[in-house]
Image (cartoon, grey):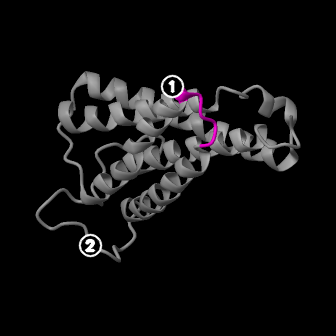
Amino acid sequence: MSDLVIIVTKILAVGTVLCQVFIVLAWLALAMKNKKFLAFFKGKEMFFSLIVVLAGMITSLFYSLFANFPACDLCWYQRIFFYPIAFILGLAIYKKDQRIADYVLFLCLFGSLIAIYHTYIQLGGSAIIPCSADGASCAKRYVWEFGYIGIPVMSLTGFWTVMSLMKIQKFNNSPKVR
């Protein structure tokens, strides 16, 4: 691995941990209806989500095109659910449409299921659905930081960060909060 790939990976690993902390805080705030925490994000949920999604897109392309890590089948399936979110959010921000949370949540849910399965395989679980024999191995770890952060965990964290932000948006836009 080149020095740039190592540096980028370290930065992404720290960013992943920070997003995981945010996810826990966000769901605790939602469960406790902590309006002070949730109000901080009011009107910015889609913008923050777009930043997360663009970072994930750029990262996946960086690993594929620059670091030359081949994307396995499960990586491609996760991208299929992740990449459209950028276009949905971008258009919603442009049109000032706050009603897109359910569409984004739907994509995040299915992408998360694939990322969970991919993480399971990378942690040594046996594949129920085999990854392509002629392509990249779904079990191969190109990145492994802090003893648990691989590319599927980064993907899962991205999906859950966006899901958390969309749930905050739904909370902030509910009639009871206004």
Pick the front one: 138 or 53? 53
Please tell me whether residue 133 is drawn above or below residue 159 in the rendered image.
below
| 94 inside magenta stretch | yes
The numbered mark, 2 or 1, whose residue comes first in the sequence reads 1
Circle 1 residue: 94
Tell which tag, 2 or 1, sits nearer the viewer.
1
Residue at image position (49%, 56%) is: 112
Q: Position of residue 93 (x, y in %)?
A: 54, 28
In this image, 107 relative to 57: left or right? right
Q: Which residue is mark 2?
A: 130
Residue 88 placement (x, y as % from top left) = 46, 39
Q: Quadrant of the N terminus?
A: top left
Asked if residue 149 can be seen in this view, the reply is no
Q: Residue at x 21, y 42 (%)?
A: 69
* Figure quadrant of the C terminus: top right
From the top left corner, tell me how far across and down residue 143 is, in percent: 34, 42
Q: What residue is drawn where x is 22% and y is 39%?
A: 64
Residue 149's place in the image compared with 137, above or below, is above
Name the kind of residue labelled 1 in the image. Answer: Tyr
Marks 2 and 1 sit apart, C-alpha to C-alpha, by 41 Å
Residue at the image point whose x is 37% and y is 42% from the top: 83
Label 2: state its secondary structure: loop
The crowding category of the residue bearing disc 2, from other C-alpha atoms within 10 Å (few below 14, some 14 to 19, many at least 20), is few
Q: Position of residue 119 (x, y in %)?
A: 43, 58
* Boundaries of the magenta span: 93-99
> Would residue 63 be found to the left or right of residue 12 on screen?
left
Disc 2 + disc 1, Cβ < 8 Å = no
